[in-house]
Image: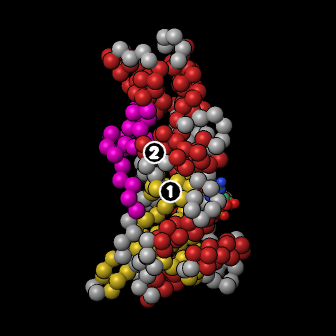
Amino acid sequence: LVRLRDRLARSGSPLGSRLLAVLSRDSLTENDWDDLEEELLLADIGMDPATELLGALRTRVRVLGVREPSAVRELLREELVALVDNDAAGRPMDRSLRLEPADQEGTRLPAVVLVVGVNGTGKTTTVGKLARVLVAEDKSVVLGAADTFRAAAADQLTTWGSRVGVETVRSDKEGADPASVAFDAVARGRDEKADVVLVDTAGRLQNKAGLMDELGKIVRVTSKVAAPSEVLLVLDATTGQNGLTQARVFAEVAGVTGIVLTKLDGTAKGGIVVQVQRELGVPVKLIGLGEGPDDLAPFEAGEFVDGILG
Ligand code: GDP
């Protein structure tokens, strides 16, 4: 927890101290509420959620007659946690990863995880970190290097694989069919009775039709052995609104089940979590807090809010 807080707060003055500075003014005027809204918007929370949150907060402050800045901050924290933790209908989101092997007529099938997203967001790194976590939990893992467009991508994944001690299925041909590499990886996972197959995909955002073809084919082809139980969309937290626009395309074409928000160590704009979940209707399941093998954490709303409040 301390670590998460340190990592998130590393980039500039934390949202919490700036909010507290506003809250510690004598009594809260319209101007102060506007300033609070501005701070929340600067943290990438998004217009509608910010308006909603401040509406709820103002009501509670008034009804409870709270004046003390630290007490207002506590109410703000509660509202933020609810905003981050719940779906649009106000229910807590299920952030568990579905990684249980399936049993199909006596054949044990690995859980298949597709990792999708725009190039450079951190897909390969996330696959490597996740493999390490799973291996530490005594799970057997196979990696699939289905990003066949960048020559270096398969090498990068293989390096992660050997570092963690798991096999990487890849093609020697640059530009090989990504779906066929994905299929081979899943088949290998089945034959070796692996628990989980993690498939790294290419993130060329050429056009929606092309992407849809490519990811659609990977899903169809791997499903001949085992349908993906998770499609994780990797999103770079530092790209803000841009990243969100790109993410929408992937969510539309790939049937995303969870989000991995990376590079949270490099931004004070953690509020993007709220926008992403609202826009895509799927929970953030994991967060990336650095480039190293241990820098992947499950997402937990309370801990995260404490992290961004500093
Ligand atoms: P891909 O093209 O989506 O597979 O992205 P990569 O996994 O190659 O990552 C792109 C760059 O982002 C690399 O330099 C990674 O080390 C870096 N990176 C990935 N995740 C994180 C993170 O959580 N924090 C930071 N600071 N860097 C990250």
Q: How many marks?
A: 2
Crowdedness of circle 2 by 10 Å Cα count: few (<14), some, many (20+)? some
* Mark 1 vs mark 2, CA separation in Å: 11 Å
Q: Is residue 50 above or below residue 285?
A: above
The residue under the point 62% across, 73% down is 160
Rendered location of residue 54, percent (x, y) = 44, 25
Labelled disc at residue 303: 2
Label 1: few (<14), some or many (≥20) within 10 Å? some
Would residue 156 be counted in the magenta stretch?
Answer: no
The percent coordinates of residue 71 (x first, y second) are: 42, 23
Measured along the vertical axis of the image, is residue 136 above or below residue 245?
A: below
Q: Which residue is mark 1?
A: 297
Q: Which residue appears farthest toward the left when viewing the image?
A: 105
| Foreground of the two, 98 or 278 | 98
How are the residues colored? secondary structure
Ligand 1 positioned in quadrant: bottom right
- In the orientation shown, which residue stands out farthest toward the right? 151
Residue 14 appears in the rendering = yes
Sequence-wise, the earlier of marks 1 and 2 is 1
190 left or right of 266 in image = left
Is residue 118 visible to us here? no
Q: Position of residue 271 (x, y in %)?
A: 53, 39
The answer to which of 57 and 45 lies nearer the viewer is: 57
Residue shown at 61% from the left, 52% from the top: 263
Q: Is residue 246 left or right of residue 99?
A: right
Disc 1 beta carbon < 8 A from ligand 1?
Answer: no
Q: Secondary structure at mark 1?
A: strand
* Residue type pointed to by label 1: Ala
Q: Which residues are magenta?
A: 77-97
Task: Inspect the image, locate mark 2, and give the three-letter code of the amino acid beneath it.
Answer: Glu
